[in-house]
Amino acid sequence: MKRHAFVYRFALVVILLVTITIAAQAFGIGVILGKPTGGLSFKTARNSTSAFDAALSWSLSAGRMLIHADYLHHSPLAKNLPWYIGIGGVVGVGDNLYLGARIPIGIVWVPPSAPIDVFLEIVPTIGLLPDYDPEVNYGLGIRYFL
């Protein structure tokens, strides 16, 4: 029964993320690997300086499904290589509920002739529930833009 509930929740979250982001001008989907986990990565560009990103993943160390969402502000660092900073939140569903706040800081390489981006980020995170738990996460990912 628990397995079925997890599958239903996972499918619902994927459908919700895709529905929310597909209405944007640019929609990217890909993978992210890092700490605490790896999974699916989504990004919608609002314009050349702002975007929303999200990820749906599974944390092996904590044994829970994680969903994070961030608002990002991009600034040019070099040609095809902006840096970004953002603010967002993370929710974890498993044996207990996990809630946290995130501040992603990263760089993204956008090749001029391919509909992809490759990103590297460091994310100071503060766990708020079930306990106060500051930590630093990181991720490396690639997304394909439809």
Image (cartoon, helix red, strand yellow):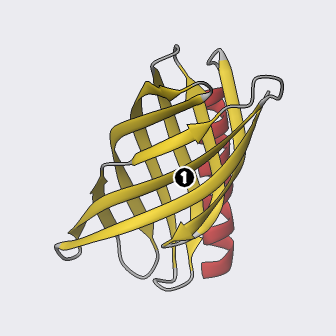
Residue 77: x and y, percent? 46, 30
Most extreme residue toward the left is: 132
Residue 10: x and y, percent? 63, 60
**Image position of 100 with respect to 85: above or below:** below
Q: Which residue is mark 1?
A: 120
Q: Quadrant of the C terminus?
A: top right
Number of callouts in the render?
1
Q: Which residue is nearer to you in this view: 34 or 9?
A: 34
Residue 47: x and y, percent? 52, 13
Q: Quadrant of residue 123?
A: bottom left
Circle 1: residue type:
Leu
Is 146 positioned to the left or the right of 41 in the image?
Answer: right
User: Measuring 69% from the left and 34% from the top, which residue is drawn there?
Assistant: 28
Q: Quadrant of the N terminus?
A: bottom right
Disc 1: CA contacts within 10 A as few (<14), some (14-19) or many (>=20): some
**Image position of 53 with respect to 121: above or below:** above
| Secondary element type, mark 1 | strand
Q: Which residue is nearer to you in this view: 64 or 51?
A: 51
Q: Which residue is nearer to you in this view: 12 or 85?
A: 85
Is 87 positioned to the left or the right of 6 in the image?
Answer: left
User: Measuring 19% from the left and 77% from the top, which residue is drawn there?
Assistant: 131
Does residue 1 appear anywhere in the picture? no
Is 141 positioned to the left or the right of 106 in the image?
Answer: right
